[in-house]
Image: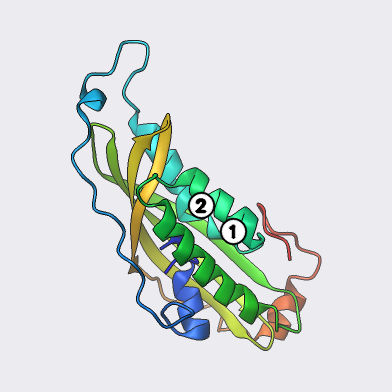
Amino acid sequence: MIVGIVAVFLAGMAASTVLLGSGRSDGAPAPATPQLTDPPASMSSRPADNPAPGEQGAIDAALELATASQTWLYLADEDLEAEVRAVATEASADVLVDDTLADVGLLRDALAQSSGRIWWIVRPLAWKVESIRAGRATVSVWTVSVLSASGIAVPQADWMTVTLDLVWERDAWRLHGSRETPGPTPQLGGRDTAWEPVPFDEALEGFQRVGPGER
């Protein structure tokens, strides 16, 4: 799934699972992301004026991709497809577009039935470079997604580790595939209990989200 990042991704997918149940909107299994092959010889012999991509760039790309659903939920299908194709490798673009449109559309349609303000926030918390070599990088990002929608979803926080496979392509780190693992998940602090949607929204009246994604 990919309402968290694309397959992913984008983080937040589990939030849609709590809300709607897992799986594609048409009930069909998601197509497999193409397997990475060995990098072409040109990547191991770059000219001096076109240096190999750096680790920090891969980290920055992973942090952005792991929380892309913060913005993607609010895009029309045409704009969403353009966003996904812009960040995907050529080999994986069609699969990621199909998965993302299906998952985001499913969640968007459900949230449209909410009678109150929708809170949908996805944030990165920590990262780890799993591997990086010759134009290939794998980076894991620990994320938290917050979702609340009156009549649709009780206030909930989903903790997830998103692992992204990146490829240096078209002079940038592009997403080839991703996978999510639940947690690690902390317990609720002892000073509070779970909130219902209406008092949750009322307590946040006048607050503005940090970052994009207003309803």
Name the residue: 41% across, 42% down. 174
In the foreground, 126 or 63: 63
Disc 1 crowd rating (10 Å Cα; few below 14, some 14-19, many 20+) is many
Name the residue: 68% across, 79% down. 200
Name the residue: 42% across, 81% down. 22
As shown in the figure, which amino acid type bears the numbered disc 1?
A: Trp
- Residue 156 appears in which quarter of the rendering? bottom right
Quadrant of the rendering where the N terminus is positioned: bottom left
Asked if labels 1 and 2 touch by Cβ distance under 8 angstroms, the answer is: yes
As shown in the figure, which amino acid type bears the numbered disc 2?
A: Val
Give the secondary structure at mark 1. Answer: helix
- The picture places residue 68, in percent across and down from the top left corner, at 53, 54
> In the displayed structure, would residue 201 be above or below residue 163?
below
Name the residue: 61% across, 64% down. 73
Residue 214 seen in render: yes
Viewer-nearest of discs 2 and 1: 2
Q: Which residue is mark 1?
A: 72
In the foreground, 123 or 132: 132
The circle drawn on residue 195 is none
Q: Which residue is mark 2?
A: 84
Give the secondary structure at mark 2. Answer: helix
